[in-house]
Amino acid sequence: MSSSGATLLQLTAELVDIPSVSHHEDGVATFVAGALGDADHLVTTRIGNNVVSRTSLDRSRRLLIAGHLDTVPPNGNERAVLDDDRCAGLGSADMKGGVAVMIELAKRAVAPVVDLTYVWYACEEVDQRYSGLIEIERAEAYLLVADAAVLAEPTSGVVEAGCQGVLRIAVRLGGERAHTARSWMGVNAIHRLGLLLDLVDGFDARMPKLDGCEYRESLQAVRVDGGVANNVVPDEVRLVLNHRYAPDRTKDQAFEAICELLSPVIDKELGDQVDLEDFSLAAAPNLDDPLLAALVAASGSAPRGKLGWTDVSYFSARGVPAANFGPGNPQLSHTAGEWIGRDDLELVLASFEKLVSNQP
Amino acid sequence: MSSSGATLLQLTAELVDIPSVSHHEDGVATFVAGALGDADHLVTTRIGNNVVSRTSLDRSRRLLIAGHLDTVPPNGNERAVLDDDRCAGLGSADMKGGVAVMIELAKRAVAPVVDLTYVWYACEEVDQRYSGLIEIERAEAYLLVADAAVLAEPTSGVVEAGCQGVLRIAVRLGGERAHTARSWMGVNAIHRLGLLLDLVDGFDARMPKLDGCEYRESLQAVRVDGGVANNVVPDEVRLVLNHRYAPDRTKDQAFEAICELLSPVIDKELGDQVDLEDFSLAAAPNLDDPLLAALVAASGSAPRGKLGWTDVSYFSARGVPAANFGPGNPQLSHTAGEWIGRDDLELVLASFEKLVSNQP
């Protein structure tokens, strides 16, 4: 093992030990700014609990690398547990390991072949309106200008391209009330839900390949709620669906497809409704972008599609091709047993160093 | 029209105009006791908001006629609206019309061929533990002794025999949590509900005939609730079922039948559970009882099975054959437009008078 692995693991542990649940990133932002020291090749700006650090080498292209500083609330895992090979603890994988890699890269890459912007930001784990990216954009939008962006979210050191979009769809099924002793005089909205759930469960997930990456859509019922009283045939039930759609569709096309799927059950005369309550846009993989193509090459692994949603969508929506690439197993995110491995940290740092040393 | 119809309609209107939502029957109990006056042939006892009035003629049989004094909460229908043919207003059908018939019968039947007990009681429309019948039983159990009982609940002047039992069954379906972007790693409890609801909706209702009365069972989902968060495959959903079962089954047999119906979906390894949360016993029609047979004859109509639940069950569980027979359309109970007709009041009073004049 090289010493960089030990350094990164130690740095991750220090970061885990600074509590930074969303909206409380002050301490960790101060730590990050301090860790950069007085490096001559960087200009560092703090905006709220966000830290932006940039080179200004007049390179033809600028790469932005972003990582969030906040964590979800603790789950008995507040303190870092460190051994030679791994660091466990809240946010270790999602994504203080990535933050550590970014700090180390920022210190080491004094003469990169592309200009670099590092963005450590607050409030990624909560409603998007609190996002540190939006706070920076409002204060100093030029700080986010770049030709491509990488989110150092946990991807186990594989480039995860683009991201799937998310729709939150509220379905309301109606019925007609009746006494349960004379149930045939009513229409039971909860019974009607059975047919609707069968359609949802039978959703034929598309798996399109885009730029060589497969996306796997999903449709999941995530909340249900209905009923009037124990002796009343209920006339209303509410179901919330979560739909992940691949980036070859617009949000409107994705919503239309779900409405079509549900249409055999939907009966407007019973007051049924299907509403798009919230959405996050999908982002195309954009792997033909030279910086992202170089990132894939530097990673040494075939890219794959990102099935979850990340701030790749934020940059993509602003015309900046973006991908996810960072240390840590994404499936450990938000679990009590979250941890990150030394190998992974080292691999991702080495890939970034390679990327910024070779002309794309 | 005889004058008795006008009297009964007027009396019903007076009763409607005395508010008596459950737990607030003091005024109406006082009115009933007062309306009986100082009749020599009756001994009247008041216990709480309940009034019991009895003849003591040493007849070989005693018939008990019961009616509740309480109503459900008002729905813009607090005041009686009276015309020549009907009285509308809160509780008119359920069951101040029946209370009026009982008062009139008690005054008129000075020399019945059977001894008579009239029970006007409180708190029928709320949880059974508040029932005035239980309050009377605890204070003076002998007041409820009888060979047969009639509940003067609204039945449109037809004997409704026995009553169906009610089970409240709570079903808990389990699953395995996962992120919705990787939904195939979990088991969606709400999706599993689809299959369960299909079984519930496909319930093949038994319609057994007992003593010539048909009972029609039902199984209805009345409440549903589940979900963790908008991006989490849910691992739990709760469903409440209301089952009405015919009196040819015990509650245990009825519960067993539902467990059997649901068994194709129930998976104990996923933590599924089916629990009997509450029940009200069914009551057999008992139309071979001489007093109830005489009631059917006096009513002039073929009897039918009672599909809802009434305090017939209370008497039946204590070995007293009981049936429902009273004025008013049961389907108007608890509706804002509730009303009762003069014809109905008259018919039921006449049937009772016939019954108590002829040796059974």
Image (cartoon, coloured by chain):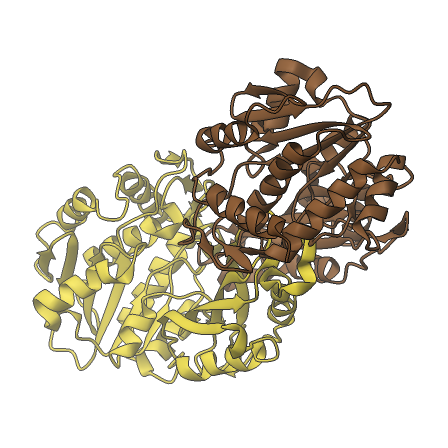
Chain colours: A yellow, B brown
Point out residue B149 in the picture as x, y percentages from the top left corner: 76, 33
Camera-side residue: B263 or A310? B263
- In this rendering, position of residue B100 left or right of residue A154: right
Point out residue A280 in the picture as x, y percentages from the top left corner: 36, 70
- In this rendering, position of residue B311 left or right of residue A205: right
Please tell me whether residue B205 is drawn above or below residue B287 in the rendered image.
below
Camera-side residue: A270 or A98? A270
Rendered residue at 27%/43% (across/down): A15
Camera-side residue: A336 or B189? B189
Q: Could you tell me if residue A279 is visible in this image?
A: yes
Which image quadrant: the C terminus of chain B? top right
Camera-side residue: A261 or B253? B253
Quadrant for residue B148, please give it. Answer: top right
- In this rendering, position of residue A73 left or right of residue A171: left
Q: Could you tell me if residue A229 is visible in this image?
A: no
Which image quadrant: the N terminus of chain B? bottom right
Rendered residue at 63%/26% (across/down): B133
Point out residue B246 in the picture as x, y percentages from the top left corner: 81, 47
Please tell me whether residue A208 is drawn above or below residue A314 in the rendered image.
below
- The mark tally for this picture is 0
Point out residue A261 in the picture as x, y percentages from the top left corner: 57, 79
Please tell me whether residue B273 is drawn above or below residue B199 in the rendered image.
above
- In this rendering, position of residue B354 left or right of residue B232: right
Rendered residue at 87%/23% (across/down): B60
Please tell me whether residue A31 is drawn above or below residue A240 in the rendered image.
above
Rendered residue at 41%/33% (across/down): A76
